[in-house]
Image (cartoon, helix red, strand yellow):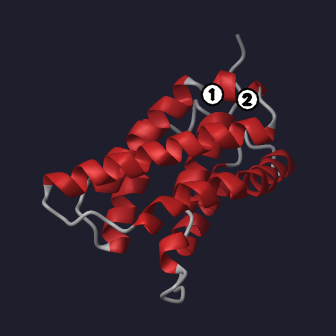
Amino acid sequence: MTITPHRGGFIIIASFVLALILTILPLPEWARPFRPAWHSLVLIYWCIATPQRVGVGIGWFLGLMIDVITNTLLGQHALELAITAFITTKLHRRLRVFPVWQQAIGVFLLLMLEEVLSIIVMGAIHRPTPALSYWAPPFIGMLLWPLVFIILRSLRQRFKVI
């Protein structure tokens, strides 16, 4: 049994930082409800590509950072991203064999799960039910998945992230 050192940690961290920046990037009022969950897309990619390095702990930490940055209930996004990371790492072998367009369907389901968990938390703290546009980001994330996948895969191959 040979042990290979992990390489490319900087690329993983940089992709998460870029996702956080895209998450807080100012948008016009009409476009805010349609902002994709960049942090979730990047987390899902790295959980599929390197499940031994990125998993529930990273998802939890990333969620806490999102909670602090966006001033939401502390732990809300942490719970959502930890569950997303758990499911993705458990299913990573199955997701890897699908073509990108079929992976996009799986990504859509994971993003919808995050939205449902968010609705449950909002209901628990007696927040009003959001508008119909609340459900747009999972669809947009599904459409953006092939682009995110191709960009992150090329970075992973170029910098030999293991």
Mark 2: secondary structure: helix
The image quadrant that residue 31 belongs to is bottom right
* Cα–Cα gap, marks 2 and 1: 6 Å
Question: Could you tell me the amino acid type at mark 1?
Answer: His
Disc 1 designates what residue? 92
With respect to residue 89, does 70 lie above or below? below
Give percent across and percent down for residue 125.
13, 58
Q: Residue at x 21, y 66 (%)?
A: 128
Q: Is residue 146 left or right of residue 71?
A: right
Q: Which mark is residue 76?
A: none
Mark 1: secondary structure: helix
**Tag count in the figure?**
2
Question: Residue 76 or 33: which is nearer the viewer?
Answer: 33
Question: Could you tell me the amino acid type at mark 2?
Answer: Arg
- State which quarter of the image contains the N terminus: top right
Give percent across and percent down for residue 91.
58, 25
Q: Is residue 32 visible?
A: yes
